[in-house]
Image: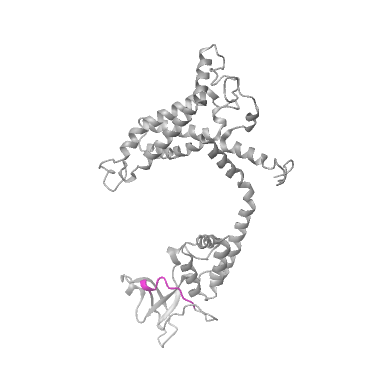
């Protein structure tokens, strides 16, 4: 993307933030910010286009359509109107917070769904018609006042109004009879209603717009994250590929895996030729459930990992955490790195690596957590 025509940031320039402020205001849902520089329509607080709203409602004072539109504009511009809608959103949000999912129709363990008392869900269902009607009237009033979509001051030119209109339409569809089981999935959209409070509070709209406008500026940070994950992922694959599957298996001579299939204390079984003693016949090596979390190593070096006791062999089983945590491929390496830098259970992974390879693995994980988790 070309930077031609883009004014560089100068901290000494009093107009340095103008471009970002305008972009944030536009993204924040205030529509076309150039409208702020246009004088308001006589008798109103902002500019309204001369085009007929919905092709019928004009701004002429001496006609019935014009009087209806002007009345709608007065209502929309009234602070009482915004306060009423904001109060309705807050009340609706409180009611939605009392939802009891396990008591909803079609939920629960009983045959045919939950058959008991609906609990607080009845209050939600009873109030749904009222709030749907109220928000529909709000949308209709704004559409008549501002126009629907064609004019640059119209209702759907504002991104926040698009979200409001979508919620209203889906609420109306979900209230129609004969919707069947699909109504439950449609009603999920009503959880967006609390977000409508942002469209009413101007400061919140500008804040959200500023955050969105700043997203392109963190492209270098995202690029660094990709570089960070790739470097540590490749390094982790070279150091720990396959070793987190190492477990200490107990060798049971003169037996086969079939003899241990029904034992609850056995997690895994392999048939091997032991490398100790005089018996060179194929025998069973059993991984006991008590040894499932203990990794091991077959190599000996400075600060070696965990060496299996006598009578046991270090063999391959499955990776920790149900096979999710490992460095066997780049995708799972990134997933393991992400878990570590969130500081959620990273020490057990480090201990697994130290036991499976060498104690010096602590250097890899300390660097990983220090650079990824703290910066």
Q: Is residue 132 left or right of residue 226?
A: left
Percent coordinates x, y for residue 122 in the rendering: 31, 37
Which quadrant of the figure has residue 24? top right
Residue 98 part of the magenta-drawn span: no
Percent coordinates x, y for residue 201 in the rendering: 51, 36
Percent coordinates x, y for residue 80 in the rendering: 47, 28
Colour theme? one colour
Q: Is residue 93 left or right of residue 155?
A: left
Q: Nearer the viewer, residue 61 or 6?
A: 61
Pick the quarter of the image with the N terminus: top right
Percent coordinates x, y for residue 301 in the rendering: 54, 81
Residue 289 part of the magenta-drawn span: yes
Q: Residue furthest top?
A: 62
Q: Residue furthest left?
A: 116
Q: Nearer the viewer, residue 202 or 177?
A: 202
Pick the quarter of the image with the C terminus: bottom right
Q: Nearer the viewer, residue 39 or 4?
A: 39
Q: Is residue 39 left or right of residue 92?
A: right
Query: What range of the chain is rendered magenta?
Result: 287-297
Q: Residue furthest bottom?
A: 278
Residue 252 vertical placement versus 371 (above, below): below
């Amino acid at each position: 993307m070309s930077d031609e025509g883009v004014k560089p940031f100068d901290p000494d320039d009093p107009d340095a933030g103008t471009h970002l402020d305008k972009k944030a205001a536009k993204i924040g849902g205030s529509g076309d910010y150039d409208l702020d520089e246009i004088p308001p329509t006589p008798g109103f607080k902002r500019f309204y286009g001369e085009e007929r709203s919905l092709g019928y409602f004009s701004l002429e004072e001496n006609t019935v359509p014009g009087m209806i539109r002007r009345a709608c504009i007065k209502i929309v511009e009234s602070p009482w109107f915004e306060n009423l809608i904001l109060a309705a959103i807050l009340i609706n949000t409180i009611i939605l917070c009392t939802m009891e999912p396990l008591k909803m129709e079609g939920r629960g363990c009983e045959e045919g769904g939950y058959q008991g008392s609906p609990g607080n869900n009845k209050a939600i269902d009873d109030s749904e018609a009222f709030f749907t009607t109220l928000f529909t009237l709000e949308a209709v009033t704004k559409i008549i006042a501002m126009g629907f979509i064609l004019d640059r001051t119209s209702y759907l030119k504002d991104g926040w109004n698009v979200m409001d209109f979508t919620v209203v339409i889906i609420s109306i569809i979900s209230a129609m009879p004969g919707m069947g089981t699909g109504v439950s999935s449609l009603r999920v959209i009503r959880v967006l209603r609390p977000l409508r409070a942002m469209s009413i509070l101007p400061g919140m709209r500008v804040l959200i717009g500023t955050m969105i406008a700043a997203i392109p500026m963190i492209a270098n940070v995202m690029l660094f994250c990709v570089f960070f994950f790739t470097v540590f992922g490749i390094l982790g694959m070279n150091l720990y590929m396959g070793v987190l599957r190492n477990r200490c298996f107990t060798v049971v001579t003169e037996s086969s895996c079939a003899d241990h299939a029904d034992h609850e204390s056995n997690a895994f079984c392999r048939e091997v030729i032991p490398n100790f003693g005089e018996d060179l016949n194929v025998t069973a090596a059993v991984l006991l459930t008590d040894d499932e979390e203990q990794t091991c190593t077959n190599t000996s070096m400075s600060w070696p990992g965990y060496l299996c006791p006598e009578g046991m062999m270090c063999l391959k089983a499955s990776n920790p955490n149900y096979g999710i945590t490992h460095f066997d491929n780049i995708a799972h390496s990134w997933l393991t790195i992400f878990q570590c830098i969130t500081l959620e259970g990273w020490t057990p992974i480090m201990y697994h690596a130290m036991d499976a390879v060498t104690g010096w693995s602590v250097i890899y994980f300390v660097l990983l957590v220090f650079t990824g988790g703290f910066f």
